Image (cartoon, coloured by chain):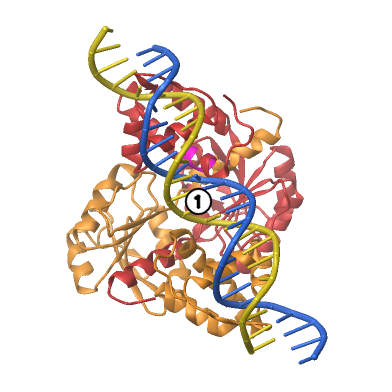
Chain colours: A orange, B red, C yellow, D blue
Amino acid sequence: MIRAHVPDIVVGRLPIYLRVLNYLLAEGRQITSSQELGDRLGISSAQIRKDLSHFGEFGKQGTGYDVRYLRDQIERILHVDRDWNVVLIGAGDLGHALAHYHRFAENRFNIVGVFDNDPNKIGKPLGKFVIRGMDELEQVIREQNVKMGIIAVPAAAAREVARTLIDYGITALLNYAPITIIAPVGVRVQYIDPVARLQHMAYYIGKENGEES
Amino acid sequence: MIRAHVPDIVVGRLPIYLRVLNYLLAEGRQITSSQELGDRLGISSAQIRKDLSHFGEFGKQGTGYDVRYLRDQIERILHVDRDWNVVLIGAGDLGHALAHYHRFAENRFNIVGVFDNDPNKIGKPLGKFVIRGMDELEQVIREQNVKMGIIAVPAAAAREVARTLIDYGITALLNYAPITIIAPVGVRVQYIDPVARLQHMAYYIGKENGEES
DNA sequence: TAGATTGTTAATCGATTAACAATC
DNA sequence: TAGATTGTTAATCGATTAACAATC
């Protein structure tokens, strides 16, 4: 049965399923089960079966799932069975690490340009890239049909960068700056904030050290 | 009224509230409201009031919240009104960026050591640190009362690193490697996976480009 | 006082889990 | 066939929202 509307939280788990399936494949496994996947991910088998049921039927009763088939299906569902071009804005330390991060290309997210507004950086090499000025951004986005952008600039510049990217047609933003981006409908934003994650965990550690909140 | 049990999802939003309160403070604002906070964060004012109600009463009817007071209270609740020592494992590109990431120290998360198992890296400088061997890890954790660890090693090494950190008494892991860590109770794990985030968004972009799932 | 906004309750909405018929 | 595991239903659990009395 195919879904009317898939909860976003379910979509967000598919990349994790994809990852564990790729590991199973690398181990040479041909068949798996919702139980095994759940054990590896620390979630219930029921949740995995329920999540998958939003998209179709992928297993066989009594047997389980063909690892490669399920992997391929999830890639198709997520639309990651193709290349995606991505622009990276910000050529500081973070931009440097992201420009070198091999997992993007391994997963078919191809960075097609690194941009910065610092005249001292423009024209300089960064890994296999040459840092470009923001004046070239629109052209690259349009010519390479870029839909995804990574924001790796300081907080003070991030809102303006987001606005520019959206103006130029970007509809998915991965934002490393510690600001909330209020985007128009049709534009997705995901946040990466390691400080917020540490703060989240600090709540629990502090508690266990015997203090009330 | 003080809570029996605060949902984890509520705790996870406190760092975001903290962030916007700090921005308001930097703008010189003295008073705010759940409405204003919600507008800035793209969530409902009701949710903010409900979230805060798990921890006490922080506002005044008819007036709103004192920005500084609420900020201080949330810092106290999250236990981020103090320094936390953190170890960083992995001195590759990612470790390099993290070692330079000023927001950790600005938010009182102090990296007290950078570790790697590569003999060619051990002893080399990395920003203000000197890369140390894994044999020094236990001593640093115990002497500096470290409870938090950041994992920035390749996937193949990450599980073993996590196990070691937990053995040495770490109870909060920020994991950048694309693996799931099954940790014992009392140990928290947070994940940073930019590829998973891009894949999550690819689902929606692909759809809008006119394809079924 | 009049106006505004909180804190809280109750209703709604949504996600997870348990259980099991279907079936490989 | 017997055993195993899926896909799905219904029940449970939890989170969000709406509404408003309390009150500054």
Residue B157 percent coordinates (x, y): 65, 65
Task: Identify whether A151 is placed above or below A180.
Answer: below
Image quarter of residue A105: bottom left
The answer to whether residue C13 is left or right of residue B138 is: left
Residue B68 in view of the camera: yes
Give the camera-side residue of A192 and A9: A9
Disc 1 crowd, CA 10 A, few/some/many (<14, 14-19, 20+):
many
Q: Is A83 a magenta residue? A: no
Q: Across the whole image, how many numbered discs are drawn on residues?
A: 1
Residue C21 appears at what percent x and percent y? 65, 76
Q: Residue at x 70, y 37 (%)?
A: B145
Q: Is residue A26 left or right of residue B170?
A: left
The answer for which chain carries disc 1 is B
Dominant SS of magenta comes to: helix
The foreground one among A170 and C22 is: C22
Residue at 60% x, 30% y: name it: B3
A29 versus B2 height, above or below: below
Q: Residue at x 46, y 77 (%)?
A: A75
Query: What residue would you read off at disc 1?
Result: B98
Q: Secondary structure at mark 1?
A: helix
Tell me the kind of residue under disc 1: Leu
Q: Is residue B185 left or right of residue B192?
A: right
> Height in image: A61 above or below B188?
below
Residue B90 locus on image (x, y percent): 59, 57
| Magenta stretch holds residue B14 | yes
The reply to whether residue B154 is visible in this rendering is: no
The front one of B29 and B200 is: B200
* Magenta span of residues: B11-15
- Left or right: residue D19 versus residue A213 is left
Q: Residue at x 38, y 64 (%)?
A: B201
